[in-house]
Amino acid sequence: MTKLVVGIFGHHSDAALAIEDLLSGGIKKKQISAVTKQKNTMARISEDTGIGPTKLGAGNGGMFGTAREIGVGLDMIPDTAVAAGPAATKLAGADLDIDGLAVSLIGSGIPQEDALKYAEHADLEHIIVFVELYAESGAEEQEKAHAIMAGHNALPL
């Protein structure tokens, strides 16, 4: 069974530095994912840390992507999540409305109550970093990941 350590960050530099420290601490890139509302923010984090390419989800590019962005700007339709890392395929493109991203997070094994709160943070343009620890990882590894997140101004859930 895997364990999930989650950090919520208000600024891209805090998230990127936390990811760098996680990587320096022995966590592998394939264990780290991130999600947010801002495409440019996720692209910068992805580039700075190397956790994987930014995924936008279907319908976020080209002519329809531009039309979608206009609709989002006018509050006619909800914005969508952008993500990087192994969980990006499940999270990218999820609507940031009442339950779009939350449903994707629940499908990834996050309890419903927490998933709804994470989705609220993503809608506020916060960056959510997920670290998947393997079954053989002990409490010490989990504590280290929590300490690294906290050391980079992680916000409370």
Image (spheres, rainbow, N blue to C red):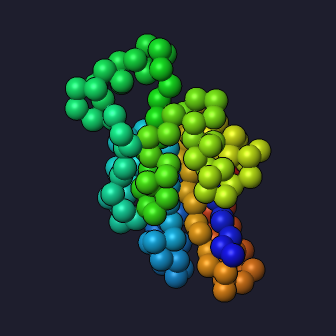
Which image quarter: residue 136?
bottom right
Q: Is residue 12 visible?
A: no
Q: Residue at 44% of width from left, 61% of height from top?
A: 85
In the displayed structure image, the side of residue 34 where residue 132 appears, left or right: right
The answer to which of 39 and 151 lies nearer the viewer is 39
Query: Against 62, is 17 above or below?
Result: below
In the displayed structure image, the side of residue 94 where residue 144 appears, left or right: right
- Residue 94: x and y in percent read 50, 39
- Residue 16: x and y in percent read 46, 59
Query: Against 12, is 62 above or below?
Result: above
Query: Against 85, is 91 above or below?
Result: above
Which image quarter: residue 71?
top left
Numbered label tally = 0
Q: Residue at 45% of width from left, 54% of height from top?
A: 88
Instruction: Check the picture and name the quadrant holding the N terminus.
Output: bottom right
- Residue 150: x and y in percent read 66, 61
Q: Residue at 46% of width from left, 35% of height from top?
A: 80
Q: Is residue 122 visible?
A: yes
In the displayed structure image, the side of residue 64 where residue 2 appears, left or right: right
The answer to which of 122 and 105 lies nearer the viewer is 105
- Residue 24: x and y in percent read 48, 78
In this view, the residue farthest toward the left is 62
Q: Residue at 66% of width from left, 50% of height from top?
A: 106
